Image (spheres, rainbow, N blue to C red):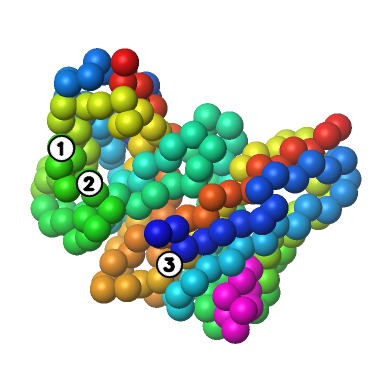
Amino acid sequence: NAGVMQNPRHLVRRRGQEARLRCSPMKGHSHVYWYRQLPEEGLKFMVYLQKENIIDESGMPKERFSAEFPKEGPSILRIQQVVRGDSAAYFCASSPGQGAVNEQYFGPGTRLTVT
Amino acid sequence: SQQGEEDPQALSIQEGENATMNCSYKTSINNLQWYRQNSGRGLVHLILIRSNEREKHSGRLRVTLDTSKKSSSLLITASRAADTASYFCATDPRMDSSYKLIFGSGTRLLVRP
């Protein structure tokens, strides 16, 4: 049973370019979460999605950032017009669905560097 | 704002010793989870403790939860060099039907051989 897959693992973008980060949840998981981690810090929640729905985007910056989880295919986190401050590790997690226990399984992350 | 706060921020011990990390949080929770992160890698889930549980064990790990003090501790017994990593607590506040986790800033554990 493959774990959460993220690609690319490393991404370098120049200021002003777009970054697209992909996440394939574990098989059977319908909930996806995106988190951002700055160096030497903990993870900060960005967005929580179910298939074709954004459930909670309270951690997403209002501009330049968007996320989707289409009916088919991976979840995408899109950052437009990247700036140096967007450099961070972006982690995706998935969980099976609603229930009393919310154990999230994390992918290896995408390390974004903006030059 | 970040809910969980771990202390200490960094801990250095000798192999074979026990390591204790603490986590405090601010709001009510559904459960609390501990994760490990090796340098430059993803997070590995260690253990989950529900709000109605007080203690849980998994191998060399022991987690306690005190909801009245809004705090948790992670004890790693008989530490090994391979335990060197950052450890994060994450709370599940289950607010507004959201299943997001709120992470602390982590404890960096160094186990010296």
Mark 1 sits on what residue?
A64
What chain does badge 2 belong to?
A: A
The correct choice, above or below, for B12 with respect to A21 in the image is below
Distance from the alpha carbon under mark 1 to that under mark 2: 7 Å
Q: Amino acid at mark 2?
A: Pro
Label 2 SS: loop
Label 3 CA crowd tier, 10 Å (few <14, some 14–19, many 20+): many
Q: Considering the image in quadrants, where does the N terminus of chain B appear? A: bottom left
Of the pair B4 and B47, the residue shown nearer to us: B4
Q: Considering the image in quadrants, where does the C terminus of chain B appear? A: top right
- Do the numbered discs 1 and 2 sit on residues whose CB atoms are within 8 Å? yes
Q: Amino acid at mark 1?
A: Arg
Residue B92: mark in rendering = 3
Residue B68 in the image, given as x and y percentages of width and height: 60, 84
Q: Place residue B7 in its image quadrant.
A: bottom right
Question: What residue is drawn where x is 36% and y is 46%?
Answer: A35
Mark 2 sits on what residue?
A61
Which stretch appears magenta? B65-72
Label 2 CA crowd tier, 10 Å (few <14, some 14–19, many 20+): few
Distance from the alpha carbon under mark 2 to that under mark 3: 22 Å
The correct choice, above or below, for A111 with respect to B20 in the image is above
